Image (cartoon, helix red, strand yellow):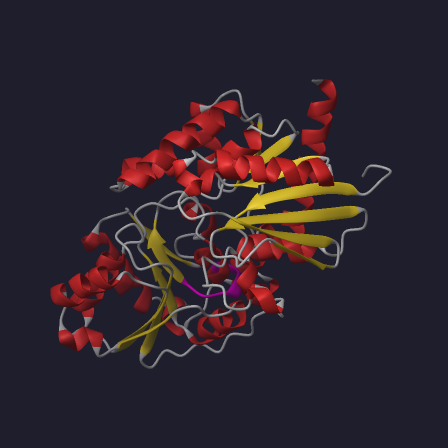
Amino acid sequence: MAAHPLKVAWISFFPIEWLPEVPAPLRNLPRVHPATWQRVLLEEFQSVADLELHVFAVRRHFPANYSFSRGNAVFHCLKLPRGMRTLSWFWWETLMLRRELQRIRPDLVHAWGTERGAALVASRLGLPYLVSMQGLLEWYSTQVSFNWLEKLEVQLEKQALRRAAVVTTESAFAVRWLGERYPHLQIHQAEHAPNWLFHRLQRQPRSGPVRFLFVGVMSPTKGTDLLLQALDRLKGEFDFRLRIIGMAAPEFLERLKASTSAELWERISMSYGLSPAQVAEEMSQATIMLFPTRADTSPNSVKEAVVAGLPVVASAVGGIVDYVLPGRNGFTFPAGSLDEFTSAIRAAVTHPLFSQGKVETETMIRMRDYLSPRTMAEKFLAAYQRVLKRAERC
C-alpha cells in the first residue's frame, strides 16, 4: 500500500437501497438488481487499513444528490435527469463524475462493468482505471436475441474495451474469450465471491417431495422456458416442488403459463426481492438447483449454490463449468437442449448424493476456497496495485 490511504472511486450501478439502514432520504428507492458481488467486496474492504472507497451511483430515481459514509466508504448518489444516460451517450454523467472526482482526487477509478456506460465513462476521465467485467455483452449477443438498446450497449462495450488497458474478469472462459478478441488487454482473473452466509450455511435439505430451486430473472436468456418445459415433462415421473426466486415480465410469465400445464403451476411458488439471508434460507432447504441459462459468464446464484453444498443441474456454458463438476456437485448439459436438460434432471433425482440434496464434501471445500470473499478482496487489491504501477510507467 501507499504511504497515504489508497483512494479508489467506484463507478457502478451500486444498489444503495439494499444496504442495511439506508439514510432516510433514500428509503423509498425502487429495488434494482442487488449486485451482491459488489456488496460482498465492499464488506471485505471495510476491514482493510489504508483504503478509502468512494462509491458513485448515478440514477434518475434519486430525489437529489446525496452523500453519506459507512466506515471507510463514502457513497455518492448523483441524480441523473431522465433520458440523459443514453441521449447524451453517457457524456452527461461523465461531466458529473469528472467534477466530483476533481474534488476527491482518487488514485484510481474502478469501473464496474461495461453496462450503463461505466467503462466508457472511466475511459474519458483521464485517471488510471480498472474495468471489472460483470458480463460479456458482445458474447451474449451471439447466443440470444437483443433489442435495440442492448445492441447499442454491445457497441459501447466494444469501444470501451478497445480503450481499456487493464480488466478483471471471472471465469477461465471469460479470460480466454477476452484475450482472443482484445489481445492488448492486461487481464486479471478475480472471481466475484458469494456472501459468507452461503459458505457457512448449515443445510437441512428436503427431498420428499424433491424441492427444486431456481434463482434468477425469469427470461429466455436464463432459460426459464426450458426449466418449465422440462419439469412439465417430468411431472408424472416423481413428486416435486419448484421454488422460483426472481422477477418476470408479465407478458413473458403469461406465455410460460400458456405453454405449460396447470398441474405444473400448482407445484410452483415464486418470490422476488429477497435478502441474501432469505435466499440462503431457501438454499438450506432445497434438494437441487436448476439453472438452464443460455448465456452466462459467471452466474452468482450458481456460485452461491456450490459453496452452500447444494447440487446444481446447469447448462455447460461460460464459467459454469468451473463451478459445477459433473458427478461431484451436480450435472451439466449442452445449453438450449431441452432433451439433455430433462435427462440431467432425471439423473440428478436418482443420484445417491444429489437426490438427498448432498454433494461431495471435498468438492464443496474446494469451491469454498476458490470462491472465498477473502480471496476476492486480495485479488482486487493486487489488481489496483498493478493499475498504479502501470500508470507510473506510462
Give the left or right position of residue 163, taking residue 207 as reference.
Answer: right
Say which of 309 and 123 sits in front. Answer: 123
Range of residues picked out in magenta = 306-311
Locate residue 31, reporting x and y percent: 46, 63
Locate residue 313, reporting x and y percent: 35, 58
Give the left or right position of residue 143, taking residue 179 as reference.
Answer: left
Q: Establish if 171 lies above or below 214.
A: above
Q: Please tell me which residue is depicted at 55% across the width and 68% down the height of the picture.
A: 27
Q: Residue furthest top?
A: 394
Q: Residue furthest right?
A: 3
Q: Number of numbered discs present?
A: 0
Magenta run includes residue 158: no
Locate residue 175, reporting x and y percent: 49, 34
Q: Residue furthest bottom?
A: 208
Looking at the figure, which quarter contains the N terminus?
Answer: top right
Give the left or right position of residue 325, taking residue 102 as reference.
Answer: left
Q: Please tell me which residue is depicted at 22% across the width and 49% down the height of the picture.
A: 337
Q: Establish if 336 lies above or below 276.
A: above
Q: Please tell me which residue is depicted at 32% across the width and 40% down the height of the picture.
A: 149
Q: Please tell me which residue is depicted at 54% across the width and 27% down the height of the picture.
A: 164
Give the left or right position of residue 256, taking residue 7 as reference.
Answer: left
Say which of 374 and 98 sits in front. Answer: 98
Looking at the figure, which quarter contains the C terminus?
Answer: top right
Locate residue 85, reporting x and y percent: 44, 41
Say which of 127 and 143 sits in front. Answer: 127
Q: Establish if 344 lies above or below 273.
A: above
